[in-house]
Image (cartoon, helix red, strand yellow):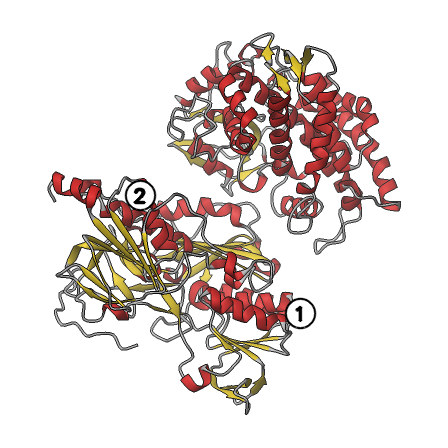
Amino acid sequence: MAVEDMDRLRRTGRIAIVGASLAGLRAAETLRAEGFAGELTLIGDEPYEPYDRPPLSKAVLLGRADPHRTELPRRRDIDAKWRLGTAATGLDLTAGRVRLSDGDEVEYDRLLIATGVRARPWPKESEARLDGVFLLRTRDDAAGLHQRLRAGPRRVFVIGAGFAGCEVASACREQGIEVTVAERAGAPLVGALGGVVGAVAAELMHEHGVDLRIRVTVTALEGDAAGRVRAVHLSDESVVEADVVVVSLGSQRNTEWLNGSGLGAGPRGIACDAGCRAFDFRGIVTDDVFVAGDVARSPHALFEYQFLSLEHWGNAVAQAETAAHNMICDGTDRRPHLWMPAFWSSQFGVNIKSVGVPPMGEELMITQGSTAERRFVGVYGHKGRVVAAVSFDNTRWLEFYQRAIERGAPFPVEYPTLDRRPENRRPVPADFPDPSLPTHGPMVTLSGYSPADTQLVFHPARH
Amino acid sequence: MTQDSIVRRITDFASRADPYPVYRELRGTPVLHEEEGGPYVISSYWDIEALLHDPRISSDAANLAAAGDDVLLQSEETGGLPPSFLRLDPPEHDRLRRMANSAFGPPHRPRRIDGMRGELREIVTGLIDGFGDARGIDLVDQFAYPFPVTVICRLLGVPREDEPRFRAWVDPLVASLDPGTRQGADEEFARTAREARMQLGMYLAGLAEERAKEPRDDLLSDLVNSRGPDGAMTMMEVLSTSVLLLIAGHETTVNLITNGMLTLLRHPDVLERLRHEPELAPRLVEELLRYEPPVQLVPQRTCITDIEVRGVTIPKGSRIWLVLAAGNRDPERFKDPERFDPDREDIQHLGFGSGIHICFGAPLARLETQIALTELARRLENPRLVQDPPPYRENAVLRGPRHLEITFDGVRP
């Protein structure tokens, strides 16, 4: 783009952002902070101004935060046209137009897609509609679930022991509510952290009085005559009575509105380059459509250029900032999104934090502390390199391991470390499930889709 | 060590008023090792930050190859107090710090510090009222010292009127933390410090026994009677922890407040702003912690294996100094680092350290200093420095003025 064209874009251009949550807001703020003076439109299907989601499965369920008061702090005035409560329904790449659910159209010179993910619903619709069956993604979900928990249910049943499911179970136990958790894999959190660490999470659950059922699936939700859920049927033929069911089966990417648009969008998200520019379905990068947050899938130089989908809070912020910067910059001024994957969770009184990409690791080594004491640092290795680390109540060491990942430090970790226990001198298999088998959906997915893929026929996703 | 070595100049009293030119020179050699047996001195921000999070770095004096001159290590052999968590590694460090924290902060005591806000303001008001009709004071003796001492006494449960008693033990102990004095270290000096620590411990033992029988609403009672998931502290652990909290709880804050007022008097525009914008205080104090950190360097770390920093191998057991105050003014990290700028947005300073040993009392120190500086700025009319630079204390680690004479035209109500 000629210099004068970029100047004009920055002064009088039109930028549309689809998705008015964390990534959308931070991108808008960055655009203004970097001097974008043109027209800015924020489109969001929820009726609320951008709010923070991590408290929804923690403080909100405990009654320590009001679900309707978790607005994201604003870093600056963004002077935007807000289209809240209006979903984007289609995209015309050639004309540069977003179609909205109310029939309106928004024209753009640059588009940022930050539509994120939604909770995967219970597949049987009639059962999903039963009173007492909840998903947990939005503030309305959290408000409804919190209200039910306050009413003192006899038992809560959580389907799926990923992070969200575990946090719900933790919030229940903290309030003395009986809870059963069903997990198809052999332990909680296996998709994100593997079986060894998952076993620690399972012990934590047992200690806190959670009725954990592993290697089972839920076959049916049973309702009473009034349409209220009353029991859960499991694949081992057991039946558990419960008056609240939380469906926590991972997430689905919000890309259906892009079907037929010509973008490379599907159930695994929208592929983009490291500069956040979206690929079209031919694998050719666009120059005016950008992607950020949970819905994006981008190659990461530190992890063998694999395309990573990261449903992490910090990733949404960092990627939004990079995307926004690149939207109003040319060529060499553009920056790659090189964020170190990191996420945290708090459950059963333990702070869990991870850096890097644990599911890439074949082996695990407990380098500090002990899993028996629930306080440790575990390091994941892949092809002789450190690729991730996880800590239970040991967050303050993680920066060291992050640097080790960044430098491709050798694995196993041979040097002595403080509080290395004699039984932990050797690595063990990290025990991740076969990625081809469905689980509740890990927080990071790896896939080999690459820009070199020249397949020219696009098959719209079937969700 | 040669006469003009950089390490020598750091500890030299002549550098006390303005050590920053030496630190600037120091950063020119990011891993400085001047002589056999001497410390490896780390001065750049990113290197310090990395080593503070490095699990190969130990705070336990027992891991030093040449531990001969270490007061704390010897005290163990001579039947003195065991080391506090400041000088321990995980898992012992973690256990003791967790137990201390359950008496001090969230999640167990989320309101202990914040709940003191009103009390802190009262103490500050009382001290400033006490200036009376005077038009000049020594800020250290009349304000910056008595304030945090009163606070830590109340928090810990130590009678304020015993201050002259414990002062006599605290002074030699604090002096022993100064690597400068250690250089000429004679056995005499080490013995004095050990004995002072013992005496202070015995004094606190008397109070702890009282609290075991009759608990009150103070830290000492909580430490003595703790029965959490980690079990109970032994009496020796209670004593070494409370010695640590008593000393660290005021020695550093005195300097932070005094350095703060000195800095404000050297930047009258900022002082005037604080007078009208008390909400500036939190950011101002963070910048102060960067610009004039009360703990200038951490001299007690070592490595449990050979490590490499910027291509230099530091052998196992070497003494490592992390010069926080030099890192805080590293131009590779902070823009215009020699400028005091309370509007700085990027202010991740090393003033409280980082990693597992990050300052335990940071929330209290912050609150005390915010309130102290805000009230001084609000109430003193036209305050001025009498002497610049003021006379400094000997200590190169816990650096601050011994006295700070100031004059003013009056005290506002």
Query: Which residue corresponds to the image point at 58% horizontal and 32% vertical from the top-left?
Result: B64
Q: How many tags in the picture? A: 2
Q: Is residue B321 visible?
A: no
> Which sits earlier in the primary sequence, circle 2 or circle 1?
2
Q: Position of residue B155 (x, y in %)?
A: 75, 37
Residue at left offset 58%, top offset 73%: A148
**Residue A43, horizontal then vertical, whole percent:** 31, 59
Label 1 SS: loop
Report x, y in % for residue A157: 55, 77
Q: In the rendered view, does B368 fall on the left or right side of B328?
A: right
Instruction: Kindly identify the residue that appears in the image at 37 percent across and 32 percent down.
Output: B311
Relative to A386, does residue A441 appear above or below in the rendering?
Answer: below
Residue farthest to the bottom, as pictured: A225
The residue closer to the viewer here, B48 or A386, is B48
Left/right of residue A9 with respect to residue A354 in the rendered view: left
| Type of the residue with mark 2 | Arg
Residue placed under numbered mark 2 in the picture: A32
Q: Chain of mark 1?
A: A
The residue nearer to you, when weighing A325 against A95, is A95
User: Can you give x and y, in whole percent of width and height, for residue B400 in the image?
Assistant: 60, 19
Q: Secondary structure at mark 2?
A: helix
Quarter of the image for the C terminus of chain B: give it. top right
Give whichever of A273, A374 is nearer the camera.
Answer: A273
Which residue, given by chain and number where applicable, does mark 1 sit on?
A176
Query: What amino acid does circle 1 point to?
Result: Gly
Q: Is A134 above or below relative to A12? A: below
Q: Is residue B123 above or below residue A32?
A: above
Badge 1: how crowded within 10 Å, few (<14), some, or many (20+)?
few
